[in-house]
Image (cartoon, rainbow, N blue to C red):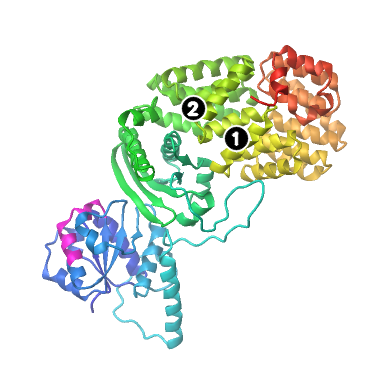
Amino acid sequence: MAEEVFISYGSADRERIQDLVTRLRQAGVTVWIDEAGIEGAAMWSEEIVSAINNCNILILAISTNSAQSKNVVRELALASEDDKTILPVFIEPTDIPESMKYQLAGIQRVEYFEGNEDESIGGVLRALKRLGISTDGDTPTQALGQAPTSKPQTKAKLPALALAAIAIVALLAFIFILKPGDGQRTAKPSAPTEEPTTSTQPETKPLDKNRIVILPFKNIGTPGENDHIVEGIVDDLNIMLTNVDGLKVIGSVSAKTYRNSDKSPAEIGQELNAGTLLQGSIQKSGTGLKINVRLIDTASSENIWANSFSGNETDRSKFQQEIIQSIVNKTKGTILNQSELGSLTQGDTQSAEAYNLVKEGLELLGKGSREANRNATQLFLKAIDLDPNYVNAYSGLARCALQSPALSLNYPNDANTMAKKYSDEALKLNPSHIDSKTTRVALTLQVDRDTTKAMELTQELLKKHPNNLRVLQQIGTILSFSSKTDLAISTLKKGLELDPKNANLHQHLAFTYLVSGEEKLAEAHNQKALELNPNYQFALHIRSLIISEQQRYGSIEEQLLRAIEADDQNPVTVMSLGIVYWRAGKTEESYKLLAELLDRRNFEYIKGGILTRFYMAIGEKEKAFKWLKKSCDEKDFDFINMFYWPLYDSVRDDPEFIRIFKDAGVYGYLIKKEL
């Protein structure tokens, strides 16, 4: 009996094809394949010609190898001449060669990429079903790992009702196969919401092709191994694209929420209002590195461009530049010159080991714990030993230093000195380094107290990088703790347009709304921040102030106790719980927590900003002012922020309160509404 499906493939892909054949046969599809070609090279013979003539469908396995195979081209030509149905199955990202374009014009394609076989086989089977090939069972992956079943020689005749059911399924499959990302279900559209906005209504609308989302790449290899490298390469691509004028890049926080999502590119594009989507996979084995990428038009779900890069891990930067060049060319229609490409990676490293250390350090830094901060610092220092000119290592050290006082690791004067030293070194190596420039704004304002210079740097960054998420987030955060509420809100909201699932942006917007009297909007964004990051200490603190002010103590008390259980050394959470206890009438419990923080101050750094807020909440104004002054003298980053905190509403006109900020030289800046 003639087999239903003939598979044409390049001999170098035989292992991948054997896997596909096994899965197809397990699903009940009869397959003819050049078995000799799997064992060893076979001549193009009459047997192959006969098999093509007798099959119903020819699966063309498209790859770089098959594109160069003369036999594959001949098999395709023969099938086309005989009016056979052809199903192109891409087993890696590649362009269709000129020798195949005529026969494949207008034919729907499916994918069977390495590392994604379990999901992709469903798409292949649905495509075959649409083309008239029936399969056994609805879940072809159930039998994976079992020995291949023998090829069925006959099929039982189906009753009329079953045939009708199959016809309906085939019709649905036909509709489904035309959807982008074959094998992916349609998500139910979410109801439209007002503030805070986390996604757009997934209705059909024009999408900007220059608005791009880079989805998390699949890590092909041992689970957990090389994850930080894969994340790092994708984050680098995001940063590089962000710095290309004319492009708007969706923030990585929102993009990462689609990891392992079954949503199609069209659905993701609609939700994020992104006309272009980049997805891919990375395989790192030893020093070897392989990157597969494809660029998708989310409006049409067609591939704009696809490619595969193979080489050594030292080729990483070259691969990234080639990917960026292709994306810019396919979206903006321009070509970046070598100088422009080089500026996007200025300060990068050629040391694979240093690169790995920094990516691991940045991953740790995001955890915000004491141990993670210490370990990240050591990794950044080791990276600098390997490459003294590695900008991101210096920037990482500056971020560690800035974070350390809040974790009771360093006193502010020491931490600020280190942060200034490392950020200056980074800017010396790369004057355009965004993270280091925003760090300099914060240090100029909070440490040097040079408000004029800080605002000049702020205006410069916002003007030069109006669509750079890092600028919008960092500058929006700085502005949120000042009187420039209108600009802070517009900056943070613009950031949320690019990264709608970013808890940090939601929380700082919540705080800005709170100090400007928009309590409902403040609570909405605060709730969204905690949904996205339940242990976010700043969000929990603001939540505790909002809820306890409304005399709703029970739920927030439970939240804070859980947070303390997860991180009992976090002084901000301890303070937050103490304020809730005080407002709930549990004065003894509140005093115990205050005494605990004061005792810890004897052997570790507890920010003056924490203690002044605690005293202000329990009504001890003089002690609150004493610790506010200490916060000022210590150059605590909380100091300037304290002026507009709701806890100080009752004393904002107090002469002593005003004098502390006047002596610091920032009172005029804080009461001025404009930059």
Where, by quadrant of the figure, is residue 343 drawn?
A: top left
* Rendered residue at 23%/79% (across/down): 1
Q: Circle 1 sits in a helix, a strand or a loop, which is it?
A: helix
* Rendered residue at 55%/56% (across/down): 202
Q: Amino acid at mark 2?
A: Ile
Side (left or right) of 410 relative to 465: right
Q: Does residue 650 sit above or below 634 in this rendering?
A: below
Where, by quadrant of the figure, is residue 478 drawn?
A: top right
Question: Residue 48, how many percent across, how many down?
Answer: 16, 69
Q: How many marks?
A: 2
- Residue hosting label 2: 434
Question: Residue 649, how many percent across, how many down?
Answer: 81, 28
Q: Amino acid at mark 1?
A: Thr
Circle 2 Cα neighbour tier, 10 Å, few/some/many (<14 / 14–19 / ≥20):
many
* Rendered residue at 50%/42% (across/down): 250
Q: Mark number for residue 491? A: 1
Question: Which range of residues does the magenta coloring cover?
Answer: 63-77
Q: Is residue 345 visible?
A: no
Question: Residue 31, how many percent across, how many down?
Answer: 27, 70
Side (left or right) of 333 relative to 395: left
Instruction: Examine the residues drawn in magenta and state their main secondary structure.
Output: helix
Side (left or right) of 414 relative to 639: left
As rendered, which of 160 and 511 lies closer to the eye?
Answer: 511
Is residue 76 highlighted in magenta?
yes
Kindly indicate whether the residue at mark 2 contacts the one at mark 1 (C-beta within 8 angstroms).
no
Question: Residue 148, how many percent across, how many down?
Answer: 33, 67
Where, by quadrant of the figure, is residue 156 drawn?
A: bottom left
